[in-house]
Amino acid sequence: MKRLLVPLFALATSALCFADAKQDLMAAAKKVADAPNYTWTTATEIEGGNWTPATITGKSQKGGFAVVTSEREGTVTTAVMKGEKGVLKTDEGWKTAEDLRNAGGGGGGGGRGNRGAMLLRTRLPADDVVKMVENLGELKSADGVISGDLTEKGAKELLSLGRGRPGGQAPETKNAKGSAKFWVKDGSLTKVEVKLSGTVSFNGEDRDMARTTTHEIKSVGTTEVKVPEDASKAIGS
């Protein structure tokens, strides 16, 4: 009987720790998502790629606007979003994703326009983590870091995220795998690192991909979000 109780106790303890880590992560992400505002930066590394996406800086209001910028070779690209709507600053004024598609890229140059279209697909990291929790397997918690593997469903969703044209269908993804680390300080989410790999189909051609995305969150509750009036009008708010 004693031999049976030991593994049962270990199993119950493991399940309890997993539940606690999941609850702690959800609470830490919601603390940021429910804050009046916050600032974040997002850096992405693509293994084996011939280019590195520009670092994104974002400032977000709860239930309001988010202003996101990226810089490459001295050129700053800016987008303003609110909910599902968003506009990109171009030489011809603020443009929606549909405007960019109709212009064949637009945005003051094809390359810049393509980067801008990608910027319009930026998602708020704290909200993303809240949604990500249900797609995480067993979690471990140590020294303020919670870590675990993504389910195949969760890895596929994140790997295809931001690929293809805005508003278009996400590309097919196979053999998707992923893991994530979450840094928590004083009960608040401060950093997220997501590693993904898999095969993504582009125009019928399969390509192996490996991507690491790192979000750093700061100035929670003390961020000032300045939204240009013409951007607000272009969004319709």
Image (cartoon, helix red, strand yellow):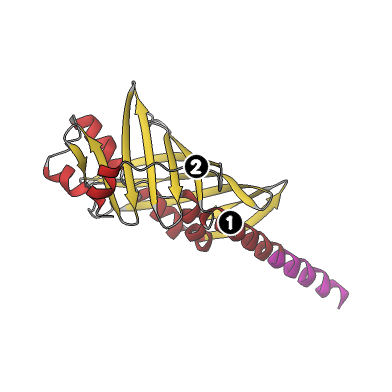
Between the residue at mark 1 and the residue at mark 2, the CA separation in whole angstroms equals 14 Å
Three-letter amino acid code at disc 1? Lys
Residue flagged by tag 2: what amino acid is it? Thr
Rate crowding at label 2 as few (under 14), some (14 to 19) or many (20 or more) other CA atoms within 10 Å.
many
> In this rendering, does residue 175 appear at all?
no
With 137 as the anchor, is 93 left or right in this view?
A: left
Span colored in magenta: 1-16
Q: Position of residue 141 (x, y in %)?
A: 69, 52
Question: Looking at the picture, how far across and down is residue 26, in whole percent?
Answer: 58, 60
Name the residue beneath numbered marker 1: 31
Residue at image location 38% in from the left, 31% down from the top: 54
Q: Which residue corresponds to mark 2?
A: 39
- Farthest top residue in view: 73
Quadrant in which the C terminus is drawn: bottom left
Tell me, yes or no, whether the highlighted magenta stretch contains residue 2.
yes
Report the residue that reaches farthest toward the front: 229
Q: Position of residue 103 (x, y in %)?
A: 12, 40
* Residue placed most toward the observer, 184 or 210: 184
Label 1: how many Cα within 10 Å (few below 14, some 14–19, many 20+): some
In the image: residue 1, left or right of residue 13: right
Say left or right for 8 vs 222: right
Q: Nearer the viewer, residue 97 or 153?
A: 97
The reply to whether callout 1 and callout 2 are in contact (CB within 8 Å) is: no
- What element does badge 2 sit on? strand
Res 57 seen here: yes
Quadrant of residue 113 in the image? top left
State whether residue 63 is above or below residue 200. Answer: below
Residue 142 point in image, percent of width and height? 72, 49
Rendered residue at 86%/78% (across/down): 1
Could you say which is closer to the camera, residue 93 or residue 184? Answer: 93
Disc nearer the start of the sequence (1/2): 1
> In percent of the image, x 23 and y 30: which residue is there?
111
